[in-house]
Amino acid sequence: MQTRVLTGITTTGTPHLGNYVGAIRPAIAASRRADVDAFFFMADYHALIKSDDPARIERSRLEIAATWLAAGLDPNKVTFYLQSDIPEIPELAWMLTCVTAKGLLNRAHAYKAAVDKNSEEGQDPDAGITAGLYMYPVLMAADILAFNAQQVPVGRDQIQHIEMARDIAQRFNHIYGREFFVLPEVLIEEQVATLPGLDGRKMSKSYDNTIPLFSGGVRQLRETIMRIVTDSRVPGEPKDPDSSSLFTIFRAFASEAESTAFRLALEEGIGWGEAKQVLYERIEADVAPMRERYESLIARPATIEEILRDGARKARAIAASKLSELREAIGLRAMSSVTVNTGKARQASKAVKSPRFASFRDTDGSFRFRLFSSDGDELLLSKSFQDPKAAGAVQKKLKTLGGTAATLHALPLSLVLELDGEPVANTPDYVDEPTRDHALQYLRGALDVLAAQESEY
C-alpha cells in the first residue's frame, strides 16, 4: 500500500547548498521508497504572490526544475508537474473558497503578520496586502486536495496551512454529505539539516549569505566558500570543530570517516584557507556530476518542459476525475441528468428510452456485460467474470448506484469504474481529453437515470 506524499516547490530564487541539503536531497531520497507515491509540483501560481517580475518567475521555474532533475528526481517514478499546467487546481480553489469561512483566513499567520506590521507603522491594516496573500491557504488546500494527498512534508511554519486544508476539506465534506476529500497529515522531518551561511547564521536568501549550488559554476562555488567567515586563529593553532561553520557544512556531505579526519585536522591546527579548500573539494565531488546534468538540462528547456507536461498529464488524469465528481456534487452536472419535478414526471420517464445492459459470454468462456446509452452508444464494458451470478450482481449494483456515488477514475483517454475499491468496467478510448470529460458527465447522467428508474419500482 503506497502513501501519496505531495511536495510543493516555490519558483522564486536560485537554489543554494542549504536548499539541497535541507529539502532537495532528502525529498528525492524519500521519493525512491516503494511505499511512497510521490507528487512534486512547481508552485508557480504561489510565486506570483511573492514576485511581480515575469523574468524572475520564468527563469526560476527553469532553474528549479533543472535543479531537481539534475539532483536525481526521476520523472518516471514520481509525478512532477507545473501547478499552472493543472487548470483543475484554480477551479477547485474557487469551490473551496465558497465554503471557507473568512474568519479562518483572518487567522492565517502570513496575513496577520502583514496586518500587524501595517498597524505598527501607523498604516491602514490592509495596506499593500493582496487578495492573493489572503487566499494563499485556499490555493494551497486545492493543491493538496485535488490529489487526495495523504502526507505533506512542511516546515513548522507551514503546519497551520495543512491544518487549514483539513478544516476546509471537512467543511466541504460536511456540506455535501460525503467524504470527498482525504484529510492530509503533516509530515515534519525532525532531523532536517540546516546549513550555516557565509556569516554563520542559517543559510538563507533573506540574509544574503548563501552558497550557490549550480549558479556561477565551479569558480563561483569555490570563491563563495573561500568567503566563509572564520575566527582569527592562525595556522598551527587548534580550532574548535563544533563551533566551526566549515565543519558543519563538511559533515553534511561527508562520510563518518571523512568527518572524523576533518575534525582531527581542525583540532591539530590546519589553516582556515587550507580547511576551506578541503571543504570545497569535498562538496565539488558531489556537486560536479549534478552540475554537468544541470547544465545539459538548462541548455534544453524544451526537454524540461516536456518532462513537466508529461507529469501534468498524469496529474490531470487524477485531478480531472476528482473535479468531475465535485461538479456533480455541487450541482454543476449535465443538464440532461436533471429530473424535472412535474405531475407527469413518472409517466414521462417510462416513455423515454433508458440506458440498458447487455450480457454476453466471451470467447474464453467468461461472462461480461456492456452498458449502452439510450442512443445505443457503448458506455461501459465490464471486466471478465467466471461466474455469471457475479456479473449479474455487479449489474444490480450499478442500477442503483447513481452517477454522484460512482467512483470513476480518468485515464489519459478513457475512464475506469470502481466498486468497493475494485475496477469492474472500462469505457471505450476517446479521441481526446475533452471528449473523455464529456463522456464522464454523460456516463454519470446515465447512471442517475438507471437509479431513478429503479427507485420507481
Image: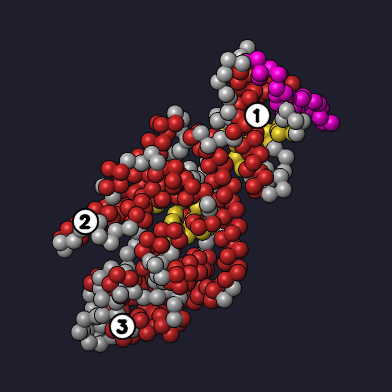
Name the residue at 30% across, 43% down. Answer: 102
**Which contiguous range is marked in magenta?**
346-372
Q: Is residue 343 above or below residue 359?
A: above
Q: Are marks 3 and 2 in contact (CB under 8 Å)?
A: no
Residue under label 2:
125
Q: Are marks 1 and 2 in contact (CB under 8 Å)?
A: no
In the rendered structure, which amino acid carries the disc numbered 1? Ala
Q: At label 3, which amino acid type do we have?
A: Arg
Q: Nearer the viewer, mark 1 or mark 3?
A: 1
Q: Is residue 355 magenta?
A: yes
Of residue 438 and residue 79, the one placed in the foreground of this image is: 438
Query: Residue 97: percent from the left, percent from the top?
Result: 39, 44
Q: CA distance from mark 1 to mark 2?
A: 53 Å
**Quarter assignment of residue 304:** bottom right
Residue 221 visible (yes or no):
yes
Q: Mark on residue 227?
A: 3
Locate residue 228: give its quadrant.
Answer: bottom left
For label 3, the crowd category at 10 Å Cα-Cα, with few meaning under 14, some 14 to 19 and many 20 or more, is some
